[in-house]
Image (tube, rainbow, N blue to C red):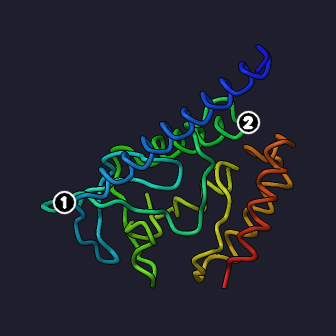
Amino acid sequence: MDRLTSAFWLIIWALLGASVFYGVNAESQRRSAQQAEGKLDSGDVVRLVKIIDGDTILVNKAGQENTTILILGIQAFESKIERDVTAPYGQAAVDALEKRAADKPIRVLLHSTPKDKHGRTIATLFVDDNDLGLSLISDGHVLAYPVYPFPSLPVYLREQAAARAAKRGFWANNEVVVRADALIRDWRKRAP
């Protein structure tokens, strides 16, 4: 094997190893956040403990264990993938969640399907009577996620169209828009 071929395979193995490392680390963080889950009911008021990513948070209801919540109707880009064009927008979603929800009471409205396949509670969250997911869509931080249908989905989709038309958030980056459109097409195939 010549030197160029050896270098090529070394790079491939290094990239594969890094991918496995980051994947295992992400799954470990997700599982540790879900180990002890408290019980939530619609209307409960919780406080933010930790932001896991742009669409998933860890909350606490007084006197209970922490609960991981997947915010209904949104999907954020990953923020921890280095050199990915979408990562800054995933981080923008995390930052927006921090700004909107830190140190404020959060009201929970549970979805009719209470948990996703990862065991996270699925809910719409309200801060100061504002739908947290809808505000993130409006600012172009996240995509409307139609896989778990809910009554406000048409409003989310309209708000997403308005954010896209105004080129807010990631909608201003053509490369990210191509990725977003690919995700949207995939979700349409999976939606009931």
Residue drawn at x 50%, y 38% as measured from the top left? 22
Q: Which residue is mark 2?
A: 85
Residue type pointed to by label 1 = Glu
In the depicted structure, whether residue 37 falls above or below residue 109: above
What distance separates the C-alpha of mark 2 from that of mark 1? Answer: 36 Å
Residue 184 vs 102, above or below: the answer is below
Q: Could you tell me residue 95's position as x and y percent?
A: 52, 38
Q: Quadrant of residue 64?
A: bottom left
Q: Nearer the viewer, mark 2 or mark 1?
A: 2
Quarter occupied by the N terminus: top right
Q: Which residue is mark 1?
A: 65
**Residue 118 position within the rendered picture, expressed as x and y whole percent measured from the top left:** 42, 66
> Which residue is drawn at the image coordinates 29% and 61% (left, top)?
67
Whole-percent x, y for residue 191 in the image: 68, 79
Given the current orientation, which residue lies at the most extreme front position? 1
Q: Are marks 2 and 1 in contact (CB under 8 Å)?
A: no
Does residue 86 appear to the left or right of 134 in the view shown?
Answer: right
Q: Is residue 99 above or below residue 131?
A: above
Q: What SS does tag 2 mark? A: loop
Q: Position of residue 15 (x, y in %)?
A: 63, 31
Other-residue count near label 2 (Cα within 10 Å), few / some / many at <14 / 14–19 / ≥20: some
Residue at 64% across / 37% down in the picture? 87
- Residue 69 left/right relative to 39: right
